[in-house]
Image: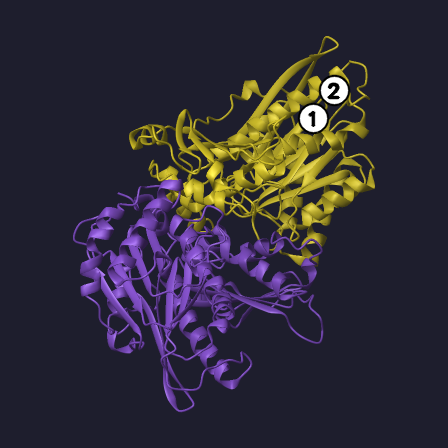
Chain colours: A purple, B yellow
Amino acid sequence: MPVNLAAPDPASLHAVPGVEIGIAMAGVRKAMRRDLTVLTLAEGSAVAGVFTKNRFCAAPVQLCRKHLAADHGIRAIVVNTGNANAGTGEDGLVRARSTCIALARHMNLAPEQVLPFSTGVIMETLPNDRIEAALPAALADRGAERWADAATAIMTTDTVPKGASKQVLIEGEVVTVTGIAKGAGMIRPNMATMLGFVATDAHIAPSLLQALVSEAADASFNRITVDGDTSTNDSFVLVATRQAAHTEITDAGSPEAATLREAIVAVSQQLAQAIVRDGEGATKFITVQVDGGANEAECRQVAYAIAHSPLVKTAFFASDPNLGRILAAVGYAGIDDLDQGLIDLWLDDVHVATKGGRHPDYQEADGARVMKRAEITVRVDLHRGPSDRKPCAVVWTCDFSYDYVKINADYRS
Amino acid sequence: MPVNLAAPDPASLHAVPGVEIGIAMAGVRKAMRRDLTVLTLAEGSAVAGVFTKNRFCAAPVQLCRKHLAADHGIRAIVVNTGNANAGTGEDGLVRARSTCIALARHMNLAPEQVLPFSTGVIMETLPNDRIEAALPAALADRGAERWADAATAIMTTDTVPKGASKQVLIEGEVVTVTGIAKGAGMIRPNMATMLGFVATDAHIAPSLLQALVSEAADASFNRITVDGDTSTNDSFVLVATRQAAHTEITDAGSPEAATLREAIVAVSQQLAQAIVRDGEGATKFITVQVDGGANEAECRQVAYAIAHSPLVKTAFFASDPNLGRILAAVGYAGIDDLDQGLIDLWLDDVHVATKGGRHPDYQEADGARVMKRAEITVRVDLHRGPSDRKPCAVVWTCDFSYDYVKINADYRS
């Protein structure tokens, strides 16, 4: 059961001028499943992406990096579910490239103008012949208002489609930012998406796009974890069709750039949090905030230690205020000179521990009351930061339930 | 259900001359539970230990380090279950010290001659008054043949007591090495024990003991993982009562030292593997061997990435040869210049992947056949090591089942 997450109202996902979406049934893994999605982008669109840091990255990820570097102008995105085309060696690259060539031929493009994405089971041969056979149907199906359908078509173990949209005014012109994402397990920073696509019609200089997609990822998909596994296929792509009528944004420090960045970050955070809310087996949405480290990297390190601990996550599942497990995770986070005698711990508004021990006013009943909630904030203060500012990191995660095991033990059957 | 693990036959756990063991019911957490164990050591015994690297280490761990450093000659070990006395701040230290003072008074020792150990729930106040009240009963209960009883008394979520024993000949004299351990969750390298006690009557120079306990830990308790959580209380202690009649061992490079080391490592490995076999919810015992890294540290890093992956562990639980998950874990292990195109993967005798992709002869039926076994070896060759030698690391772990979640969600109720 996802935590406070419903499918987006299709009407709320605004079309992005310059982007058309078509969907088809290719039969990648199962028949009669809408498993192939094509996004076509108007000429002049700029595209940037960030990809998994897994060294065992999938064939499509390797091709995406290459095609973006070729810089011929990306005009199409093709996504299949049911097969990740990862752990497939040289053969996987040939098959992913074959799909790009086929789509490019239909659209009269160069293959380097296509970005391929695959998600699903690892180490199975991609049935690219079936994908290629379904490309004409996907292209014929295209429309501007298909974001909600696409959000559904890219799902794997997701139980709810994930989409978000925002409109802002730049020089009085309406600018749209709309995105979709999929992912529910194998979620861990760098990158955690499994797949995310955000598009805007903002008229932004292509040279600003790479920094923008990195910033957005850092504030969203790189802040979530479900199980600590980093996927081979994680990809997050930002498209700017540049069709809006405002003056081109060329200065990353301008108020217009800030307005756009804020909208992109908001959409990305909503998508990233949706992934956690739909985390495999999740029953609770947990925000972990760590304050007062020597720097932000250290705060993030401690936040992830807490967010990754199976013992902490099972305690949340059980609504059991066995909160010493959080202190233990702080202790093994890898800060060599940590002074446990300084640490404070809060669960929502309840002050659980101070100076590394139980807070004198803490009552187990208070902890138990908070643990029953569907959304909980864990806050730790390490009290070792510089006095003039307060380094802080926030990570979002979910609890760890029977169903996580069930979903991952049954995934292929 | 533990994996191929039975309680040790009490007769197989040989008494160690110079060590006596007594057990009592202190009612630490539950009434009528044998939760207090005291080991007394003959005068002249040498003791060394290695302890958790968790910065949030428990009060007894802090006292152990201090008492060993004081070097007054350790004469007693006191262990309680039911309460870890961790995350208890200054008050926890006072209570642990109070227990040492009480036991020292009964035995006419200095408090620094006592090593305290606690295991159980974190962040609860230690009822040291009840422990101290039960000390006379534990002392009166002492005998040399109580190792199997002690193995049972120190259990928490363990389902099977863990003991091992070996006898070797040194200069024709029988020398005994006997040990017990407890632990089933919160198991991760450095240290993974939760608690382990190994004693020998070998006549070894005290100055050699610290290196010996570190070597033994490195070859055993530091090679296992159940859930990646590092406990606040992990401790592994080696006692040498030095009562055997052979000439004192003073040279770490001597054949006698080698004989002793081998016996201590064998007992420690048997205990460490028993912890994994009894891992919370374990249904399978998995050996992960990584060959051909640039060095051993790198091999170990990859082995742990595989052994920690919840996705890999749930696949083993399901007997599902979803083996791409292993390749994905190799990919995110943190080797920046890893070439996925070189990697080989075997599951027992089945060659699953080569050059980073599916092996041409690999059949899913072969993978499925191996995955059904209760003991499985995963072997990865990274093919990036020096040609003149073959760096290698072995880690032992278990699968990840519904019962892991159940045990840890229910632990306190």
Q: Earlier in the sequence, mark 2 or mark 1?
A: 1
- Regarding mark 2 in the picture, which secondary structure is present there? helix
Answer with the quarter of the image where residue A339 lies.
bottom right
Which residue shows up at 37% across the image and 64% down it? A74
- Regarding mark 1 in the picture, which secondary structure is present there? strand
Can you give x and y, in whole percent of width and height, for residue B300 in the image?
58, 37
Residue in the foreground of this view, choosing between A266 and B165? A266
Residue in the foreground of this view, choosing between B104 and A40? A40
Circle 1 residue: B19
Residue flagged by tag 2: what amino acid is it? Ala
Circle 2 residue: B257
Count neighbours of disc 2 (C-alpha within 10 A) and say few if under 14, some if 14 to 19, many if 20 or more. many
Can you give x and y, in whole percent of width and height, for residue B374 in the image?
39, 29
Residue flagged by tag 1: what amino acid is it? Val
Residue in the foreground of this view, choosing between B132 and A302? A302
Label 2 lies in what chain?
A: B
